[in-house]
Amino acid sequence: MTPTPNTGLDAHLAYARRMDRIDGLAHYRARFLGTDADADTANPRSYLDGNSLGRPLRASADRITDFLHHDWGTRLIRGWDEQWMDLPLQIGDDLGRACLGAAPGQVFVGDSTSVLLYKLARAAVDSRPQRTEIVLDSDNFPTDRYILEGIARERGLTLRWIDSDTESGVTAEQVRQVVGPQTSLVLLSHVAYRSGYLADMQAITAAVHKHDALVLWDLSHSVGSVPVDLDRCDVDLAVGCSYKYLSGGPGAPAFGYVRSDLHEVLTQPIQGWMGAQAIFEMGPGYQPASGIRRFMSGTPAVLGMLAMQDTIAMLNEATIESVRAKSVALTEFAITLVDEWLAPMGVTVASPREQTHRGGHVTINHPLMRQVTKILWDNDVIPDFRAPNGLRLGLAPLSTSFVETYDGVAAVRDVLRGILLGQNGGRGHTRPVELR
Ligand SMILES: *Cc1c(COP(=O)(O)O)cnc(C)c1O
């Protein structure tokens, strides 16, 4: 069976155009640099990796320039007293309100996700010194697994692995089966980086608490696209990236959440001066600050915290519920196109089909996806590749249009078909899709 040729005017394209017209969030796309609404930059035809590195906002370009000229350039060292010292907690509160369902005083920004994972996981296992096991899953993001391997070695603990399905994710039932009186900590991703599986945060957290263990959720792939309700789910600890859906920019610092009643109970292992009670007394011994500040370590990366503020304000304005509704519509549309155009060429959907179990991206598998991705990147269509066979379509809801999604999947179809037909000496080709 051969897929329908790209005529440029089929029912799916008509649907995409109509959706873009009636989409109440469509106007946000023009706020991003590099979209087709932005005449100043060379635009990628289709950017489908906003879940790995979000597009920058125009407001952030202005904010960063302004910061250099004014805040840093003229206020100089006075900037710390005037505003920078409070920035990690202030942004944390704003993020908690806009996206995390977290009351003020529980979220901070600082370090990388990897380092925050270490700090919070170590604090958690050290609070249960009699217990011997950490629970994690085999398909979690590498850094999450590596950090826990290191902590287990440091502390003489055993890792209990949940063997998670790479095409779905960890269920509450699987967690109930492994958590027990020996468990100190369970670490899971809310949205799985590979499959996009959306875990049941509430049920899993309750299952972990039944044994008085602590849970640490990695929100890297959910924050900014899926509503998160940390307080209502009674979550203990969470971390997440700010350079994915939050468009904080490459390497922007991560955020951490610690539920307020745990602040005085937990001790984090990197006790730097910025987490101390009286920072500028520079006293002889470490006394942790009260509240969430005690989880900070060193000087905040102020420059790296600029862009995320614009995204958080935009998410607050758009509301995370509307963002999620568009995200679901985009992923449904992508799956429809994959089923119709790509399934006949042997492509399978490796993400949950049930929308309540799916986050903001869709992964599709085919043995040729590495080669397909390479050709797509050369042609300015940008999904990403996850070994061994996965092409990941990340559909950042505020910067991605339905027509862009259509163009992206159409390009995958054309490239894959080109390779399969052995055109251009087997290197494949892509016909340029009409730029919209
Ligand atoms: C992106 C991502 C990270 C990244 O960690 P860094 O320390 O920023 O490199 C960690 N965990 C998950 C689940 C991720 O998706």
Image (spheres, helix red, strand yellow):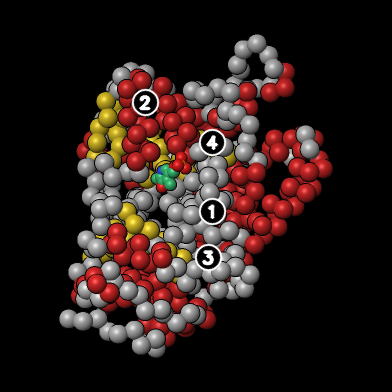
What separation in Å lies between label 3 and label 2 (alpha carbons)?
Answer: 38 Å
Between 433 and 340, the one nearer to me in the picture: 433
Q: Mark 1 near mark 4, Cβ–Cβ under 8 Å?
A: no
Q: Report x, y in % for residue 432.
A: 41, 78
The relative height of residue 106 versus residue 129 in the rendered view (above or below) is below
Q: How many marks?
A: 4
Residue identifier under label 2: 151
Between 167 and 96, the one nearer to me in the picture: 167
Residue identifier under label 1: 246
Please give the label number shown on residue 111.
Answer: 4
What separation in Å lies between label 4 and label 3 (alpha carbons)?
Answer: 26 Å
Q: Amino acid at mark 3?
A: Leu
Please give the label number shown on residue 398.
Answer: 3
Q: Residue at x 63, y 27 (%)?
A: 274
Q: Secondary structure at mark 2?
A: helix
Residue 184 appears in the figure: no
Q: Secondary structure at mark 3?
A: loop
Q: Amino acid at mark 1?
A: Leu
Specify the quadrant of the image occupied by residue 367.
Answer: bottom left
Q: Mark 2 near mark 4, Cβ–Cβ under 8 Å?
A: no
What separation in Å lies between label 1 and label 4 (alpha carbons)?
Answer: 16 Å
What separation in Å lies between label 1 and label 2 (alpha carbons)?
Answer: 29 Å
Q: Secondary structure at mark 1?
A: loop
The 10 Å Cα crowd at callout 3, few under 14, some 14 to 19, many 20 or more, is: many
Q: Residue at x 26, y 41 (%)?
A: 138
Q: Amino acid at mark 4?
A: Asp
